[in-house]
Amino acid sequence: MERALAGPVAVISMHASPVGALGRGENGGGNLAVRRLCQGLAKCGIPTDVFVRREDPLSPAEELIAPMSRLVRLPAGPARPLPKASLADHVEAFSAAVVAHAASERRHYVVVHGHYWLGGLVAQRLRETWGIPWVQSFHTLARAKARVGLPLDERRSIAEAWLVASADRLVTGSVAEARDLMRLYGASRNRICVAQPGVDLRVLRPHDTARLRADLGLDGHRVLLFAGRLEPLKGADTLLGAVVRLCHESRFDDVVTLVVGEDSGDGAVAGGERRRLEAVVGSNGLGGRVRFLGAVDHEDLADYYDLADICVMPSRTETFGLVALEAQALGTPVVASAVGGLTEIIADGQTGMLVAAGLPQAFADAIATLLDDSVLREQMGEAARERAASFTWERASERLAAIYGRLTRPQTATSTPCGYSDNEVMANAG
């Protein structure tokens, strides 16, 4: 039995809000994970305060995420969205604002949990100020992105290495992320715990999509779905390359691709990732075959998952891949890159298909195989729904609560990432 916490947890998500619209700005699976985990921690009896940087002067200073969990917006720099590259310059001000807020309420935290590297820089300062354990989650890693050919953010890479060496505990969303921390940053496996995200089946329940299909003019069409922030990391250009190849075959004349999401901060570089993708669509005569729908509220994404015949995740790297898990929960098979956490979510050949990242022809072949076989799609969809049900936020929250509980004891080290055996960790780290 883990010892119950004696007080609240300070959760630091400086760069993006857990209640923000997914697929817009910096909001993605990591932000949804923070929200769902805090909701789950509340059910475990653990109160949380989630601190974010104020980006809109009209937003409320506080709002409830769940009973016992609140979102707190604090000033640090101008009250508007800022490029992630500039947020590190406001870490000191944000840290001071968190300390001042806690002091004003005489609030005493027992653990601080930093999210993303910017949140880690804040959490480290709070650990030193408050003398409490510090848990760190990264969600994405600079060196993992550089490994697949994206530019290396040297400042972030150095900061991440320092955070990895300094945090009391590192919590990852997948065994693949744990492996990256060990291989790319030299992390000690004794301080890594794995808490895989889950899926909320109450939100992602089957829907009647007839109205949405009619509103989008998709009656009589088969649908491919891409959902995520628009940035090079997510590989939407690979999907478009696959669509170009599919369009050469008349049997796919009824196929329409929906792109849900907007430019992230990274995607806004050089004029915007959406603009670049739209240029690809135009130059290849795909107008009408590919539609950009912008960001969609998470509660409405279920309709799009349910509407789609296939969900496509062509990411160049992926720490976990919540979109793939949620699509499977709606019985939609996924064609995805065989990278990172996607290999842990998707059972290749059973709930979807894993293919080499960055190869449009490989994606086109896999998509064509599923489009040509409705029976196979249905079989995979049923298997996908069953597999997704095994990933729950309740389990993830209970693991996180157990991690926090261990940190209140004198011996804080465990021999392996929590929830996984030595063999599993080392097999994935080799």
Image (cartoon, rainbow, N blue to C red):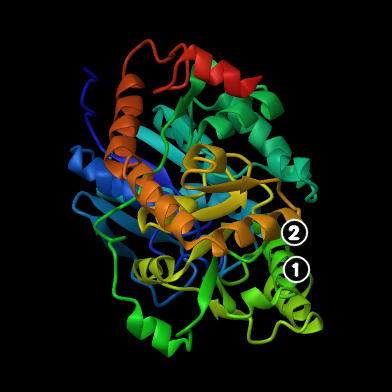
**Residue 255 vs residue 78, the one in the foreground:** 255
Q: Give the vertical position of 270 relative to 407 (above or below).
A: below
Per the model, the C-alpha gap separating discs 1 and 2 is 8 Å
Quadrant containing the C terminus in the rendered view: top right
Give the side of residue 151 with respect to residue 376, left or right: right
Callout 1–callout 2 Cβ contact below 8 Å: yes
Residue in view at x 63 percent, y 66 percent: 230
Could you say which quadrant of the image residue 412 lies in?
top left
Could you say which quadrant of the image residue 265 lies in?
bottom right
Location of residue 167 in the rendering, given as x and y in whole percent from the top left corner = 52, 27
Q: Residues within 10 Å of mark 1 (few under 14, many from 20)?
A: some
**Residue 387 vs residue 232, the one in the foreground:** 387
The mark found on residue 107 in the picture is: none
Could you say which quadrant of the image residue 219 lies in?
bottom left
Q: Amino acid at mark 2?
A: Pro
Q: Amino acid at mark 1?
A: Arg
Location of residue 378 in the rendering, given as x and y in whole percent from the top left corner = 41, 57
Lower position in the chain sequence, tag 1 or tag 2:
1
Location of residue 352 in the rendering, given as x and y in whole percent from the top left corner = 51, 49
Disc 2 is placed on an element classified as helix
Q: Residues within 10 Å of mark 2 (few under 14, many from 20)?
A: many
Quadrant containing the N terminus in the rendered view: top left
Q: Which residue is mark 2?
A: 360
Disc 1 is placed on an element classified as helix
**Residue 25 vs residue 223, the one in the foreground:** 223
Residue in view at x 70 percent, y 29 percent: 184
Q: Nearer the viewer, mark 1 or mark 2?
A: 1
Residue in view at x 76 percent, y 53 percent: 359
Residue in view at x 58 percent, y 16 percent: 426
Give the side of residue 417 with respect to residue 430, left or right: left
Q: Which residue is mark 1?
A: 245
